[in-house]
């Protein structure tokens, strides 16, 4: 049995294939990424997805195939469609099962309807498999709690207790990207996020907001000092996360999370300064290992035997 994971993001699509019989910590046997796009229509998105999946027919080789799909926005399980997607409007109302079936190479079929899962939960699941439990949780014999923040076109979060998701609002721990983290700065006005709310985290550090404010992001990330308004806003969000969720570990995932690795220590210092005493001692701040956590996590979740 192999499983295919697809992560439809705001700027590209990523895919991964895992073997269901491999140890959970093993890396995917195949990963790929589509060409970049910007605000695509459904026809363009379909072309990108079709081109990306050409290699799957070679990998599948008549093996049973399951699939997991990360699609941005609010998913209605009754109609299996996206009902709201601020960053990917072309997906609203689209039959996701039919979309994936139409893009698979000839001769490749999936056994069951694809598992639809948030990119934040999928990425957190894959990341969790590659990082051992925090020693504090082992010593106290309590669930290891991970707060995984996915930073990309959108901003989301998942909270896992020993790999099991905490659900507060629907299938998520809440709308982390819409949290008000207003930072008052003489040079940067408090922004509006794509949801219409002012001061939301996504309005500071989502990719569209960063591009609009900073321009050349490669140069901006390369010159980070750690005192930028975006970093301060993220630090405030993590501080709130400590008060609400009390994680042992906080992980920054997604493309932006990877790019923040050089300032990880500075960011941790910002978070830790006068942090509430409710926060756990010796908490860790970690970073993504690679850009395919969400796609790999979607595949791993789809391969779980309970779905058979």
Image (spheres, grey):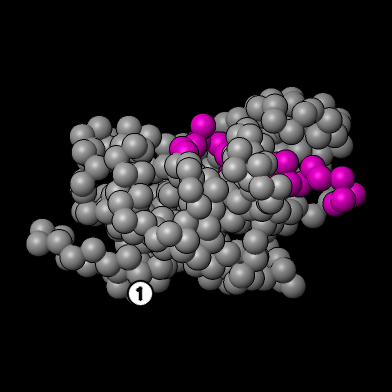
Where does residue 90 sit, x and y in percent of width and height? 51, 62
- Asked if residue 136 lies left or right of residue 207, the reply is right
Where does residue 193 sit, x and y in percent of width and height? 34, 67
Q: Indicate whether residue 177 is drawn in magenta.
A: no
Residue stretch in magenta: 286-308
- Foreground residue among 126 and 133: 133
Give the residue drawn at x 25%, y 32%.
222
Residue 7 appears in the figure: no
Q: Indicate whether residue 306 is drawn in magenta.
A: yes
Please name the residue that numbered disc 1 is placed on.
196
- Foreground residue among 238 and 40: 238
Q: Decide: is 95 above or below 25.
A: below
Give the residue drawn at x 37%, y 34%.
261
Where does residue 120 sit, x and y in percent of width and height? 56, 52
- Asked if residue 155 lies left or right of residue 19, the reply is left
Quick one: label 1, few (<14), some, or many (20+) residues within 10 Å? few
- Asked if residue 229 lies left or right of residue 297, the reply is left
Give the residue drawn at x 22%, y 54%.
229
| The image quarter in which residue 199 lies | bottom left
| The image quarter in which residue 4 lies | top right
| The image quarter in which residue 190 lies | bottom left
Residue occupying the far right of the picture = 308
């Amino acid at each position: 049995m192999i499983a295919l994971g697809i992560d439809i993001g705001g700027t590209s699509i990523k895919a991964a294939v895992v073997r269901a019989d491999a140890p959970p910590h093993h890396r995917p046997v195949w990963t790929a990424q589509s060409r970049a796009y910007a605000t695509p229509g459904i026809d363009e998105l379909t072309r990108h997805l079709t081109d990306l999946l050409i290699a799957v027919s070679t990998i599948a080789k008549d093996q049973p195939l399951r699939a997991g799909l990360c699609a941005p926005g609010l998913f209605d399980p009754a109609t299996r469609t996206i009902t709201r997607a601020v960053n990917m409007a072309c997906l609203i109302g689209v039959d996701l099962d039919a979309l994936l079936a139409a893009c698979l190479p000839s001769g490749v079929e999936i056994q069951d309807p694809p598992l639809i899962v948030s990119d934040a939960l999928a990425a957190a699941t894959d990341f969790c498999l590659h990082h051992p439990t925090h020693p504090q949780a082992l010593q106290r014999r309590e669930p290891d709690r991970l707060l995984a923040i996915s930073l990309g076109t959108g901003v989301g979060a998942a909270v896992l207790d020993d790999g099991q998701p905490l659900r507060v609002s629907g299938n998520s721990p809440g709308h982390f990207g819409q949290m008000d983290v207003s930072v008052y700065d003489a040079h940067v006005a408090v922004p509006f996020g794509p949801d219409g709310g002012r001061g939301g985290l996504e309005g500071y550090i989502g990719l569209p907001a960063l591009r609009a404010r900073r321009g050349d992001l490669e140069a901006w990330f390369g010159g980070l000092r750690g005192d930028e308004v975006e970093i301060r806003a993220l630090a405030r969000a993590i501080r709130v996360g400590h008060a609400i969720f009390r994680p042992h570990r906080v992980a920054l995932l997604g493309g932006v999370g990877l790019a923040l690795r050089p300032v990880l220590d500075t960011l941790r210092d910002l978070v830790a300064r006068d942090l509430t005493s409710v926060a756990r001692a010796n908490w860790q701040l970690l970073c993504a290992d690679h850009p395919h956590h969400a796609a790999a996590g979607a595949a791993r979740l789809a391969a779980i035997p309970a779905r058979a």
